[in-house]
Image (cartoon, rainbow, N blue to C red):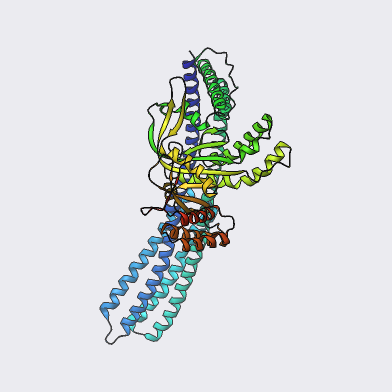
Amino acid sequence: MIKQSIRRRIVAISVGLIILMLATSVLSIVMIRRVGHLLDELSARYAPINGHLTRINTLSLERGLAVRRMVIAKMQEPPDVLGYRARLELYNAKGDEVESEAQAARTLINSIIEDASTPSDNAALARIENRIENLSDTRRKLKQETGELLSHLEARDFAAVRRSLAQADAARDELDEKVNAIRLSMLTVSDGAIAKIRSEQTRVALTSAIVTLLAAIVGLIFANLVSGGIIRSIRQLLEGTRAVEAGQLDQSIDVRATDEIGQLAAAFNRMVVQLRNNQRIKETFGKYIDPRVVEGLIDRPNLTAAEGQRRVMTVLFCDLKGFTSLSEGMTPQGLVKVMNHYLSVMSEPIRNNRGIIDKYIGDGIMAYWGPPFVDEADHARLACLAALEMIERIEKLREEIPELLGVRATPMEKCDLRIGIATGEALVGSIGSDVMMSYTVMGDVVNLASRLEGANKVYGTRNLVSERTIAAVGTSLEVREIDRIVVAGQSRFEAVFEIVGNKGDLTPQQLASRAKYLEGLSAYRDRRCDDALAALNASLEAMPGDGPARALIERIESFKAEPPPCDWDGSWHIEK
């Protein structure tokens, strides 16, 4: 029933709008045809009249020229009889044409006056027609003067010819002046006709615009009245949809109808309930698992595939140095407060740089970057940027923890960060048992990142990064090579680097220290102990307290008592 009703209303709206459009179109066509009729008159009558008058002037000049050529033909010795006759015939023919042009102009003027379907200045046109008719008197006078001139030519009385020629020229000038005056009057009347056409065009455009606007208003009112009953329930659905789009999942639609719109409203309410449940799941588990993993587990079932996938990932481990001794004097409540604040501060740079926090391990953080959350070309750089931002926040954290505990004497000097970052192939997917699973990463790259975090203790650094990570980062960061190390569980050495800062941000002291350190590292690997010590001490002078330089100096000093084996490859084994 409702489908038929909606169909009838839609058809009624369409028919009404079509009728309004047809009425507007018919009116516009009628008015446009009126303007077209005026333009036709302008082109078919006014323009030819001006052309006839112009040709009368031209013909008069041609007749005067023919008379002069007849005089020249008679004055020749012997006289040019054939030329004289040819010019005489041309003179007479041009006279007939003048009469024809004048008659044609009068005929067109009379047709304009007689046509009552177009507005015209009939009085002015009648005066012009009368003036054209009166030209016959001037033309008769010119004909008489020219006849006398021709008689004198026949008698070869050239003195009389000169007098007659002057009188004929005067008569011709008088005729030309009258024709020019008539032409100017006709141009004025033509300009008036053009002005009327322009006025009519403006009126047509204005009338069409007004009629179209009125038709549109009437059509809108009609459509609004007819469609009001249809869209009332749909508007409720639209408002509910917008509320859901804005995140307001507590909305429901109360539509009492049992038709299709009512069924749609019921389905909408069920959808909102399901969205509300999904949102509650995301909010609840988003505090325990990274929200993007939760979203993927809900929206992309393929993330839950137990077999996992091998992908190149970047893994970060972070640990708070000195936290164990600091926590010994804290109450459980204070410890929880400090831990929550520390983890919140250090987690923010990871999330800001699109990392996934895998787990918190005491005061440690494990995070990773890679597909499907980050493009493979970006994850190493984003992990390094997160590490830099975490290091920048340690000073502020040292100030905030005593304020948080309310004990300003809390020793925070020993609190610092240790970060390890590695890039490599890892197993990614949902890993666990039948009763509990975790979406995580596993593999040698995870172990390496963890070992690099611990290796910071050996070198007194805040971050150590694998060679593959640095290669993926490129030249966007300032780094320095620290050493070649063999970590527990591996048999081959790994070149490790320290992220010093963003590109171009190093001070002259940092640049000098890095250059000397790399010089000392090269000498150390070549077993040139004295050169290595000199370069490393110079590095310490540029940056006092540099941990890697002190660690290598101590190691070189120990080599004096117990040199490395002959097949030493310049690497250092870290077993703990």
Percent x, y of residue 498 = 50, 51
Relative to residue 548, is residue 397 depicted above or below? above
Residue in the foreground of this view, choosing between 465 and 409: 409
**Residue 202 visible to the viewer:** yes
In this orientation, does residue 200 appear? Answer: no
Task: Answer left or right for 382 relative to 162.
Answer: right
Task: Kindly give the residue lying farthest to the front in the view shown.
Answer: 561
40 and 100: which is toward the camera: 40
Q: Quadrant of residue 273?
A: top right
Which is more toward the observer, 368 or 533? Answer: 533
Tally of numbered discs: 0
Residue 406 picture location, percent across and down: 74, 37
Residue 33 position in % (x across, y down): 46, 42
Residue 216 or 193: which is nearer the viewer? 216
Question: Residue drawn 40% across and 68% down?
Answer: 58
Q: Is residue 269 above or below residue 325?
A: above
| Residue 7 spot, x, y in % from top left | 47, 19
Q: Is residue 553 left or right of residue 251?
A: left
